[in-house]
Image: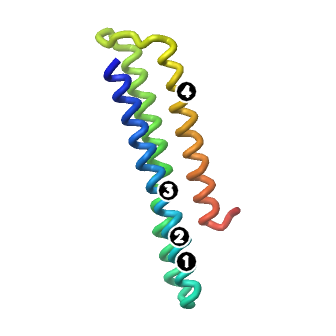
Amino acid sequence: MRSDLSNLRTLLSWARTSVSMIGFGFTIYNFYSGIFEDVGRPRLDEAARNLGLALVVAGTVALVIAIWNFWIINQYLDASSVALDVPRALKRRWIYSYVLTAVLMVIGVITILFMLRVI
């Protein structure tokens, strides 16, 4: 049970870090692109966009890695003969973790598309 809860906490820590990276990247993009547009330096505007985009992409990729890691460890715990069985009602909470991570990934992808000026 402790391993299962630890796995869930790890996923939520990854999600918190990813949200921070996505938010910080978008903030850098918006803040500095506005300043550099006023100054009239398009080259620096592109640098701010690239730095922000790198952070948003890193945050979104971190979510993919986090959900993959969470799923692999869940599979191991289910197959392990040493681990105690997690009650079925508690296993349903994994659905919330997957939904949360999927929503955050969608937000990350939409942010990337916005920063690339696709939408």
Identity, as a three-letter code, of the amino acid under mark 1: Ser
Q: Is residue 82 left or right of residue 115?
A: left
- Residue 33, label in figure: 1
- Cβ atoms at labels 2 and 1 below 8 Å apart: yes
Cα gap from disc 3 to disc 4, whole angstroms: 23 Å
Q: Position of residue 35 (x, y in %)?
A: 53, 82
Numbered disc 1: secondary structure: helix
Cα gap from disc 4 to disc 1, whole angstroms: 38 Å
Q: Is residue 37 left or right of residue 12?
A: right
Q: Earlier in the sequence, mark 2 or mark 4?
A: 2
> Relative to 44, does residue 81 appear above or below in the rendering?
above
- Label 3, residues with CA under 10 Å away: few <14, some 14-19, many ≥20: many
Residue corresponding to mark 3:
22
> Relative to 61, does residue 84 appear above or below in the rendering?
above
Q: Position of residue 105 (x, y in %)?
A: 56, 46
Cα gap from disc 2 to disc 1, whole angstroms: 6 Å
Q: Earlier in the sequence, mark 2 or mark 3?
A: 3
Residue for point 51% across, 66% down: 27
Numbered disc 3: secondary structure: helix
- Residue 29, label in figure: 2
